Amino acid sequence: SQRLRCIDRRTSARQQSRLLGMDLAELRLQRVMLVIDPALVELPTGQAVLESLRDNRIDFAVYDQVRVEPTDSGFQAAAQFAAEGKFDGLVAVGGGSTIDTASCFASKCSRSTALASATVNAASMSGMAK
């Protein structure tokens, strides 16, 4: 049976970011959609996530068009990006809007296809952007 699998580690954001690629490799994912808050891409957390995915040879594409208080058009843009990318995995890195955008995609996708997902919550990253 196909189902949504979620990785939810209770570790520091920095450690979680480093372990992410390893977790996704264990799930044997072929292609991952990385939904990330655009403010985090160049910060240590975003860089740690990207490095972990590359180090573990995870094929991924970045969706960083998330906006605060996402709208229907924002969700539609993410869904179109996802449909074109043919992803079997989803990673959300950021706060509420990022996770909402990814969750909207995941809930629609998981009804018809297997999808693995992971989240790295920005709330646990408070000291990392300094």
Image: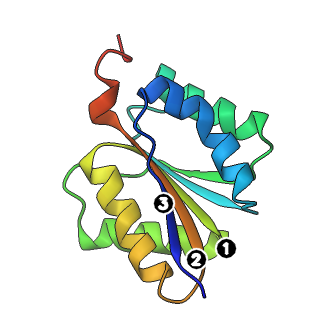
Above/below status of 130 relative to 123:
above
Q: Residue at left 34%, top 26%?
A: 125
Q: What is the x, y in percent for residue 32?
A: 64, 58
Question: Real-space Cα distance between discs 1 and 3?
Answer: 19 Å
Along the viewing direction, whichever of 72 and 1 lies nearer the viewer: 1
Quickly name the residue at label 1: 86
Q: Hey, which residue is sitting farthest top in the picture?
A: 130
Question: Real-space Cα distance between discs 2 and 1?
Answer: 6 Å
Along the viewing direction, whichever of 96 and 119 lies nearer the viewer: 119
Q: Residue at left 25%, top 49%?
A: 96
Disc 1, SS: loop
Q: Quick one: label 2 or label 3, which is nearer the N terminus? A: 3
Quickly name the residue at label 2: 83
Q: What is the x, y in percent for residue 55?
A: 77, 33
Disc 3, SS: strand
Disc 2, SS: helix
Quickly name the residue at label 3: 6
Mark nearer the viewer, 2 or 3: 3
Q: Say what amino acid the circle numbered 2 marks.
A: Ala
Circle 2 Cα neighbour tier, 10 Å, few/some/many (<14 / 14–19 / ≥20):
few
Q: Hey, which residue is sitting farthest left in the picture?
A: 69
Asked if disc 2 and disc 1 are in contact, CB closer than 8 Å, the reply is yes
**Quadrant placement of the N terminus:** bottom right
Q: Residue at left 39%, top 77%?
A: 107
Q: What is the x, y in percent for residue 80?
A: 51, 74
Along the viewing direction, whichever of 73 and 14 lies nearer the viewer: 14
